[in-house]
Image (cartoon, grey):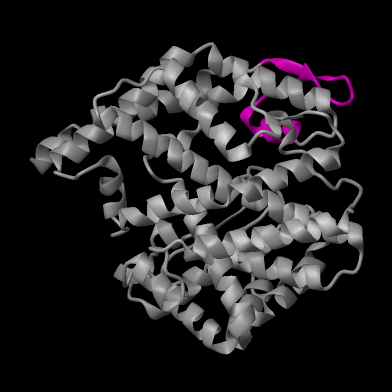
């Protein structure tokens, strides 16, 4: 039976391959005029930058042009997405799983309750997102907040130029709560050529950490002196030191850690860093800038990824129950979720109904929830480290050293975070509430 299923694997990959070809090669986006009145073509890479523009016309035209391109292929994209869900259902039935969700979580022995508790906990605190949206509307000074207004910075007149040498000092100070041993490894990475710092010809964009068992990890950045880049340095060193600990403690077979915990160490570093930076600035605008940075992280990671996870759960359940997925019902499901997650203070523009059609992660079923759970676990861990000190740090280092020697849920429990309950998500959302309080008081 498994041999037959393996032989069917290439056919089963067809929907994902078709979408990838369409999304990465065939789709063409229109041109718009940028802030300077110059023609610029919308691309995947430019889209978010255009949405971050301070010129509302640019944001609106980018948003409308981007989704118009997807809408013109809505039935094709619905067929592709539906086919991918159907192949997942086929394999789940063949392997006697009760659902596609159970099948997807089985590899890491993740209880289904982890997934459903995440969604339930976010639903319980949806009022916090509504507060965030109301605050955004107020600070932007607009009568109607649209979906294309959700990415532009709320605080724009703060320019933090941070050279790399200064960034290393800030990150080192921010991560001091993790103790001397962790600090020593961090300094080893900073001063012994673990990091390729600056952009270079033919160098991959973005930032990432990689390596091989038996060597120290390597971090590749494209550092350009921004605040975001300071957080990126802390983030990638979190990945690197997680790998360092796992590789040094575990044999090769257990050294690699599961995706479920892959973003925990990196995000924990960011949470500790922002706590340090907020405590060490008296400048109100700088503080507001930092809080805005973190609020947007919450919006994009905890709320948005949970909304994606709920969309996947709904659509897979529909196919499991014999219903069809069409462009019309997919758009309605997605529209209704945006109404639920963003509330009445946002105009849910019809263009956003097509966003489901552009998310490549949906072709790896039930993957995106791990961004939200990992983020929640990281916030919970950072709060415990700041509150309890050494005992929490020792538990955390034990977690970092675990690799895949135990299931990820059990490794996190050892560090004091039980992701089978709502509590870590509630703790993360409690911090989100505190940050909203601070932002509102600063800008009153």
Instruction: Tell me what residue is drawn at x 72 percent, y 70 percent.
Output: 275
- Give whichever of 397, 207 is nearer the camera: 397
- 35 horizontally vs 112: left or right: right
Q: In the image, is residue 309 above or below residue 289?
A: above
Q: Is residue 334 magenta?
A: no
Report x, y in % for residue 306.
Answer: 50, 46
- Is residue 50 found inside the magenta-colored segment of the image? yes
Drawn side of residue 108 relative to residue 3, left or right: right
Residue stretch in magenta:
30-51
Where in the figure is residue 210, as x and y percent of width and height? 51, 59
Left or right: 93, with 117 as reference point: left
Asked where in the image residue 67 lies, by quadrant, the reply is: top right
Do we see residue 362 in this rendering?
Answer: yes
Placement of the N terminus among the 4 image quadrants: top left
Name the residue: 20% across, 44% down: 98
Between 250 and 65, the one nearer to me in the picture: 65
Seen at 44% across and 23% down, the residue is 330
Residue 279 picture quarter:
bottom right
Q: Is residue 165 visible?
A: no
Determine whether 364 is above or below 425 in the image.
Answer: above
- Return the x and y of residue 355 as percentages of the image width and height: 55, 27
Q: Is residue 254 above or below residue 391?
A: above
* Extreme residue toward the top, this view: 72
Q: Position of residue 215 (x, y in %)?
A: 47, 71
Q: What residue do we see at 25% from left, 32% from top?
A: 320
Task: Report the number of numbered marks.
Answer: 0
The residue most toward the left is 1
Comparing 443 with 180, the one in front is 443
């Amino acid at each position: 039976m498994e041999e037959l299923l393996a032989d069917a694997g290439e056919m089963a990959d067809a929907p994902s391959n078709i979408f990838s070809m369409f999304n990465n090669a065939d789709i063409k986006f229109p041109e718009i005029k940028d802030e300077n009145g110059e023609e610029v073509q919308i691309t995947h890479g430019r889209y978010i930058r255009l949405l971050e523009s301070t010129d509302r016309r640019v944001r609106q035209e980018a948003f409308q042009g981007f989704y118009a391109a997807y809408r013109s292929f809505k039935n094709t994209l619905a067929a592709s997405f539906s086919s991918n869900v159907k192949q997942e259902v086929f394999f789940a039935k063949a392997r006697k799983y009760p659902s596609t969700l159970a099948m997807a979580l089985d590899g890491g022995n993740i209880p289904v309750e982890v997934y459903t508790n995440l969604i339930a906990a976010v639903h319980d605190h949806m009022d916090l997102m509504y507060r965030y949206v109301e605050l955004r509307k107020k600070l932007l000074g607009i009568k109607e907040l649209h979906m294309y207004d959700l990415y532009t910075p709320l605080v724009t007149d703060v320019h933090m130029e941070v050279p790399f040498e200064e960034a290393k000092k800030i990150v080192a100070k921010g991560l001091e709560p993790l103790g001397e041993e962790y600090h020593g490894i961090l300094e080893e990475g900073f001063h012994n050529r673990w990091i390729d710092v600056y952009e270079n010809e033919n160098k991959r964009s973005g930032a990432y950490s990689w390596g091989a068992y038996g060597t120290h990890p390597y971090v590749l950045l494209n550092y350009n002196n921004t605040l975001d880049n300071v957080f990126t340095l802390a983030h990638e060193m979190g990945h690197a030191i997680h790998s360092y600990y796992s590789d040094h403690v575990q044999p090769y077979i257990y050294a690699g850690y599961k995706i479920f915990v892959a973003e925990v160490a990196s995000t924990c570093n960011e949470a500790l860093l922002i706590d340090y930076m907020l405590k060490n600035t008296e400048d109100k605008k700088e503080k507001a800038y930092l809080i805005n940075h973190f609020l947007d992280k919450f919006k994009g990671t905890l709320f948005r990824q949970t909304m994606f996870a709920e969309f996947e759960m709904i659509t897979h359940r529909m196919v499991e129950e014999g219903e069809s997925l069409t462009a019309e019902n997919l758009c309605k499901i997605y529209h209704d979720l945006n109404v639920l997650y963003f509330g009445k203070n946002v105009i849910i523009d019809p263009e956003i109904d097509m966003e489901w059609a552009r998310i490549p992660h949906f072709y790896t079923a039930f993957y995106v929830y791990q961004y939200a759970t990992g983020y929640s676990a990281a916030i919970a861990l950072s709060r415990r480290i700041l509150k309890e000190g050494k005992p929490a740090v020792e538990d955390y280092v034990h977690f970092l050293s675990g690799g895949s020697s135990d299931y990820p849920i059990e490794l996190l429990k050892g560090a004091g975070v039980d992701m089978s309950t709502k509590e870590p998500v509630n703790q993360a959302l409690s911090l989100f509430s505190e940050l909203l309080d601070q932002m509102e008081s600063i800008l009153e």
